[in-house]
């Protein structure tokens, strides 16, 4: 009898520790097509082209954008020569750094971390055009860190070897033809075959039928060219969504957009047009941004962010309701059980993200011990 009485009254408490705040987004998706004011740059001669500027880089009329080598051998030699010149310049910079007594170690560590992050971003995004520069930047910062640690780096042998390589390559008769930008704009090296498929003028008045035709387009044969120029900084993305999403696009407002296939997040885009047509809505969005990532977008999965925020992520079965039907959780603080009311911000069925609706600082906090199991759980109970 004594054992049964003890077993009945004994109620072990188990808890779940809140150790971080979690972000959430409520989104929906549609398939979109990117339209830019782009014109192909015609190929003036036969040969192997080497781009001199990055995708999405702004160029002025007459700026050099590429060189055309007579054959593959000349192209290889030209690249080797330019790479050797750039490497020699980096070693000269390192040589100038030698002997410096005052280097900001904290800033240098931050620069190395940033350079490494940039390198990994290139790898993840398959941005192999920018990979060489990212690797060189990381190597240069790391070498400067070695100077800081060891006091000196002897680069004279490397510089002598590179200088010999430059003289050797310069002695070759490399046949090159320069290519200049025919106009000012954003240069894009890659061609996808859609350049002349959709007229840029009038895109803001597209209806659902026109957008459906655009989404069904197939790329045309890629014409011989040195890339393309985007004259206007404004580009559009068009698509079709269900009628249930009509209120998710504020008229003449802005929406936050993700492009998951391209690894691009949190883009603020202007709502240009929302047109109802039967059970469908024609959506036209625009943006004034341009870089290498935006320059290569075409057929994209568009993710519209309806709501977003952050809170505390906990298992859904830990949410309780008090006598006032307020949602919240039971936490153990010291030896006292407390019911903390909280708003459910987001739920995926298995877990929820909650935030305290207490403005006086008595709400949910990091490292709270949320009660997951126990008998006779109630607000104010003291655990002995």
Image (cartoon, rainbow, N blue to C red):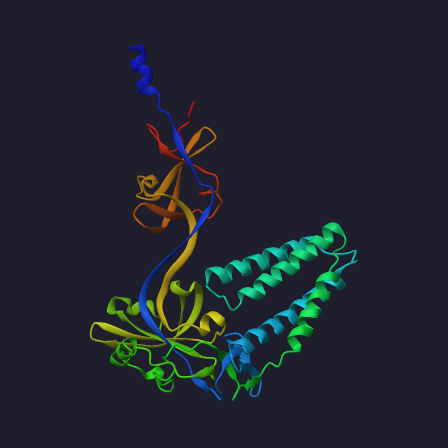
Question: Looking at the rendering, in which quadrant would you find the N terminus?
Answer: top left
Of 143 and 235, the residue lying toward us:
143
Q: Position of residue 20 (x, y in %)?
A: 47, 45
Q: Is residue 323 above or below residue 70?
A: above
Q: Residue at 53% of width from left, 67% of height from top? A: 130
Q: Residue at 54% of width from left, 76% of height from top? A: 73
Q: Residue at 62% of width from left, 73% of height from top? A: 81
Q: Is residue 327 above or below residue 118?
A: above
Give the quadrant of residue 118: bottom right
Q: Residue at 43% of width from left, 85% of height from top? A: 39
Q: State left or right for residue 44 relative to residue 375.
A: right
Question: Looking at the rendering, in which quadrant would you find the C terminus?
Answer: top left
Q: Which residue is outermost to the top?
A: 1
Q: Position of residue 284 (x, y in %)?
A: 35, 76
Q: Position of residue 180 (x, y in %)?
A: 55, 86
Q: Position of residue 115 (x, y in %)?
A: 59, 59
Q: Is residue 88 above or below residue 99?
A: below
Q: Is residue 52 visible?
A: no
Q: Is residue 312 visible?
A: yes
Q: Is residue 268 above or below residue 63?
A: above
Of 40 and 382, the residue lying toward us:
40
Of 323 and 263, the residue lying toward us:
263
Q: How many marks?
A: 0
């Amino acid at each position: 009898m004594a054992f049964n009485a003890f077993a009945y009254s004994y109620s072990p408490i188990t808890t779940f520790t809140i150790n971080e705040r979690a972000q959430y987004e409520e989104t929906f998706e549609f398939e979109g097509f990117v339209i830019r004011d782009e014109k192909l740059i015609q190929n003036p001669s036969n040969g192997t082209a080497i781009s001199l500027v990055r995708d999405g880089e702004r160029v002025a009329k007459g700026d050099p954008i590429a060189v055309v080598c007579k054959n593959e051998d000349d192209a290889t030699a030209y690249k080797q020569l330019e790479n050797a010149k750039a490497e020699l310049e980096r070693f000269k910079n390192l040589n100038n750094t030698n002997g410096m007594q005052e280097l900001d170690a904290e800033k240098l560590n931050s620069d190395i971390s940033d350079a490494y992050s940039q390198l990994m971003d290139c790898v993840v995004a398959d941005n192999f055009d920018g990979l060489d520069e990212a690797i060189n930047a990381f190597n240069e910062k790391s070498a400067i860190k070695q100077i800081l640690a060891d006091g000196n780096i002897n680069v004279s042998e490397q510089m002598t070897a590179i200088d010999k390589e430059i003289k050797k390559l310069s002695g070759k008769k490399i046949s090159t033809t320069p290519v200049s930008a025919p106009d000012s704009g954003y240069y894009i090296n890659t061609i996808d075959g859609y350049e002349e498929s959709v007229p840029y003028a009038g895109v803001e008045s597209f209806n659902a039928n026109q957008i459906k035709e655009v989404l069904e387009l197939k790329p045309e044969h890629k014409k011989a060219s040195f890339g393309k120029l985007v004259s206007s900084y404004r580009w559009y993305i068009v698509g079709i969504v269900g009628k249930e999403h009509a209120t998710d696009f504020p008229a003449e407002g802005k929406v936050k957009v993700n492009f998951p296939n391209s690894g691009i997040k949190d883009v603020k885009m202007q709502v240009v047009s929302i047109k109802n047509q039967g059970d469908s809505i024609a959506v036209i969005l625009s943006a004034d941004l341009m870089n290498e990532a935006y320059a290569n977008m075409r057929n994209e999965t568009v993710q519209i962010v309806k709501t977003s925020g952050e809170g505390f992520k906990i298992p859904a079965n830990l949410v309780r309701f008090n006598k006032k039907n307020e949602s919240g959780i039971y936490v153990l603080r010291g030896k006292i059980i407390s019911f903390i009311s909280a708003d459910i911000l987001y739920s995926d069925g298995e877990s929820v993200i909650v935030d305290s609706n207490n403005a006086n600082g008595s709400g949910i906090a990091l490292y709270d011990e949320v009660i997951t199991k126990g008998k006779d759980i109630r607000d104010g109970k003291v655990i002995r």
